[in-house]
């Protein structure tokens, strides 16, 4: 049997089939962009990493109570390879999944998922409302302010950085760099 290699077009069609909300689409695009950026930095395959980033929250709008598990079911039904299914499901390790991140792709996804939300929120409170002039140190300040973007799970991000053996500031910088590449699509160009 030939291996099915999911394309970006296929991933995007799935995301649109299961998601109507603008917020989740932007989140999917943010995580995709960061995954692509980080794959390039690590000499990994940006398409594989990007596609997993795009679909990781596929089930969240329609099946919030079955988050992660349902995404696994859908991707398997559509014939996606186990590598992709495992990676997508592992992002919710300890929260909605018992699949522990093992590969580099999985660890990076786990670490950056929530962080994209904190970076976006930090950009939007700048005078520029832009990610283009946002720096890691501003995000670190917001990190310490627990009331700011309170829904962002800092513990998960911290655990992700530890898995990668990365300094939190460096991780934040890479997430910012990845998101800058699609700033317009994310509504984060602001007035720059
Ligand atoms: Fe999720
Ligand atoms: Fe997510």
Image: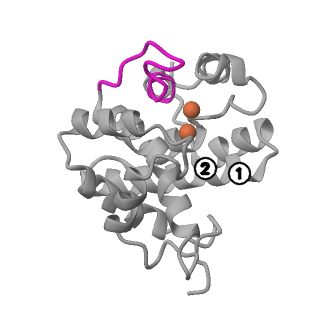
The answer to whether residue 72 is above or below residue 178 is above
Q: Secondary structure at mark 1?
A: helix
Dot label at residue 27:
2
Evaluate whether residue 182 shows in this view: no
The CA span between labels 2 and 1 is 6 Å
Question: Residue 87: horizontal and vertical position, in percent?
Answer: 44, 28
- The residue at the point 37 percent across, 60 percent down is 141
For the residues labelled 2 and 1, say whether their Cβ atoms are less than 8 Å apart. Answer: yes
| 145 sits to left or right of 136 | right
Front residue of 173 and 55: 173
Residue visible at 61% across and 34% down in the picture: 57
Specify the farthest residue to the top. Answer: 98
Relative to 22, 93 lies left or right: left
Residue extent of the magenta highlight:
86-102
Is residue 19 at all visible to an observer of this figure?
Answer: yes
| Relative to 152, residue 130 above or below | below
| Secondary structure of residue under mark 2 | helix
Prevalent SS, magenta region: loop
Q: Which residue is mark 1?
A: 23
Q: Position of residue 1 (x, y in %)?
A: 51, 18
Q: Is mark 2 within 8 Å of ligand 2?
A: yes
Give the residue drawn at x 29%, y 29%. 103
Q: Report whether 129 appears left or right of 100.
A: right
State the residue in front, 84 or 145. Answer: 145
Counting the numbered discs, the total is 2
Q: Residues within 10 Å of mark 1 (few under 14, many from 20)?
A: few
Residue 46 image position (x, y, % from top left)? 40, 51
75 above or below 25? above
Residue 115: percent from the left, percent from the top? 44, 48
Q: Quadrant of residue 187?
A: bottom right
């Amino acid at each position: 049997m030939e291996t099915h290699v999911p394309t970006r077009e296929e991933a995007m069609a799935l995301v649109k089939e299961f998601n109507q909300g603008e917020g989740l689409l932007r989140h999917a695009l943010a995580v995709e962009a960061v995954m692509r950026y980080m794959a390039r930095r690590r000499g990994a395959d940006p398409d594989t990493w990007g596609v997993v980033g795009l679909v990781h929250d596929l089930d969240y709008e329609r099946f919030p109570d079955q988050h992660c598990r349902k995404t696994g079911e859908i991707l398997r039904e559509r014939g996606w390879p186990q590598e992709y299914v495992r990676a997508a499901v592992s992002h919710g390790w300890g929260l909605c999944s018992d699949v522990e991140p093992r590969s580099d792709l999985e660890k990076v996804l786990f670490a950056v998922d929530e962080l994209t939300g904190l970076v976006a929120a930090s950009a939007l409170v700048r005078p520029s409302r832009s990610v283009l002039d946002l720096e890691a140190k501003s995000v670190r300040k917001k990190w310490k302010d627990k009331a700011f973007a309170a829904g962002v799970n800092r513990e998960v991000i911290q655990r992700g950085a530890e898995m990668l053996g990365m300094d939190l500031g460096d991780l934040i910088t890479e997430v910012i760099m990845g998101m800058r590449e699609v700033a317009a699509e994310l509504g984060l160009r602001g007035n720059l």
